[in-house]
Image (cartoon, grey):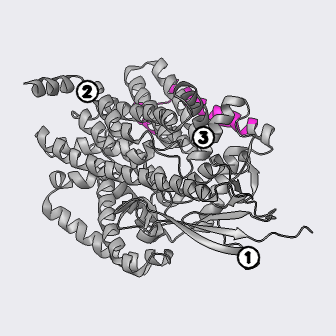
Amino acid sequence: MLFKRIGFWLAAHPRSTLTLLVGAALGPLLAKPFNIDDPLFVWLAQQVRAHPANPFDFSVNWYGVVLPLWAFTGNPPGAGYFFALAGSLFGWDEIGLHLGGLLAALAVVLGTYRLAARCCGQPLLAACAVLCMPVFLVSASTIMCDVLMLACWVWAVVFWVEGLDQNRAGKIFAAGLLVALAVLTKYFGVALVPLLAVYGGWHKRKFGGWVIALLIPLAVLGGYEWLTRLRYGHALFSAAAELSSQAHANFAVSKPAAGLIALSFTGGGVAATLFLAPWLWRARTLAVVFGVTALVGGVLYFGDVLHKYPALPEAARWSVAAQFILWTFGGVLVLWLAAEVVRRPREPLAWLLALWLTGTFLFTAFGNWTINGRTVLPMAPVVGILLARRWERAGLKQPGAWKAVLLACGVFALLVAESDFQLAVAVRRGAQAVMARQGQRKGTVWFQGHWGFQYYMEKLGAKAEDFEHFTPSLGDILVVPLHNTCTAEPPPDLIASRDVVGIPGPIGLTTFHTAVGAGFYSSYFGPLPFAFGQAPAEAICVYELKPVAPK
């Protein structure tokens, strides 16, 4: 009887239900160590707290040389202000800052629910589907700008759609302000301007006062360009676009390979589509689509994609191929959801969803400097909504079925998020183990690499090596993590001895390692968003250095 009452209460209070689910899913991840680009956002937040009018005016050795943040940052400062507030309210440790990220994730889920209520009769299904996606849980457990930008994005769409439907100028201009906040959080937010403009023109069939609201983010972006040029000597939005273009040229793959890898990241990232597929499409249809995907994907994988990953061990290539085809199949189904809108009567809101999804996919595959889970993330709310619409059109009314399927998908997403958690733990343990071995030994501990390893090494007293000015003294140590970037073995004449420290990482499933083809944070490391298989331990080389005679 008690469980029935709880069930009735949860069904009658969907927003409270979603809040509890978000807390249950992300609560265990609050203590996750900082990793990948988290440190940049932590340092940015600390700079904002100290100098709110000058967020980028501090230097960091991130790529082996000391540079001011404004010289290489690829993101605007919005997340820095948000996490500065979170740090002031909840504390500056991992738990405090992740609490801020949890609030942003909750805003995404609740915004999806509100938008879905206008698109289908199963808004709770749509919102739960988002929460059960690996790309969402992994991204929501980081201290980066992506989930915060998506929260602004979703609520901008909510207010825009409601404002135009209800002729409410307040909501329309609130949407414009939220678009501006999205742009100042992550530059991809500017894509909202043409998206909302198309919907507005289609919905109203003429220009009106609503157009002015879309000038707000454009004016804010123009002002940001002017202010950053004035303060830092160059406009940061233009500079970020140029840096991305240069990086894209350096890491580019062929268009077919990029499209296929993007499908893999999409299918795995929003895996709820694959979990629900047996209920949404006929078995014969799925078999045909899978067969074509396996044929085309297999040919391109072994003929083109595989050659981009020479570090992938021979023994892992067939395992990676099987997972690659499975997630690519899932990606095809995701695009199919958008394609079905095109075949239906022209509904402006449904077309907005389809353009939202396809635009994000095209940017992921061909626009960003690398394919990664963070660029797939903006698809999550629209995929959740389209899945709920597809469920309704399939005539499925059994709530027990989708609850069971989403539970299974949620457990899977939690396993992926937990593996990313364990990877971050291994990185922190590696830094702690290396520094503990030095004890009271004299000499400076230098290190290479960045990401979370840099954060914890510096916190423990080590110094980042400057490749341009490095002169070790007697007793100095150089620490080089092998699973990192911006690293190089020191010259042989500098090495007195060499040792390797190994720290076990995730077991059986990982989000980021070349040995198993997992590249959630960059497809440069692998064609999969995450991979089954045992990744090697986090290996760290420790070099005792010979002193360099002063010149």
**Type of amino acid under label 2:** Pro
The local crowd at label 3, few if under 14, some if 14 to 19, many if 20 or more residues have their Cα within 10 Å, is many
Name the residue tied to disc 1.
491
Q: Residue furthest front?
A: 440
Mark 1 touches mark 2? (CB < 8 Å): no
* First reached walking from the N terminus: tag 3 or tag 2: 2
- As measured in the structure, the alpha-carbon distance from the residue carrying label 1 to the one carrying label 2 is 61 Å
Q: Residue furthest right?
A: 551
* First reached walking from the N terminus: tag 1 or tag 3: 3
Q: Residue furthest left?
A: 1
Residue 333 coordinates in the image, percent (x, y): 28, 57
Q: Which residues are magenta?
A: 198-227
Please indicate, yes or no, whether residue 205 appears anywhere in the rendered image. no
Q: How many marks?
A: 3
The numbered mark at residue 42 is 3
Going by the image, does 67 lie left or right of 286? right
- As measured in the structure, the alpha-carbon distance from the residue carrying label 3 to the one carrying label 2 is 33 Å
Q: Which is in the foreground here, disc 1 or disc 2?
A: 1
**Is residue 537 shown above or below 27?**
below
> For this rendering, which residue is in front, 477 or 271?
477
Name the residue tied to disc 2.
14
**Type of amino acid under label 1:** Pro
Residue 401 coordinates in the image, percent (x, y): 13, 44
* First reached walking from the N terminus: tag 1 or tag 2: 2
What residue appears at the point 27 percent right and 46 percent down from the top-left corner?
410
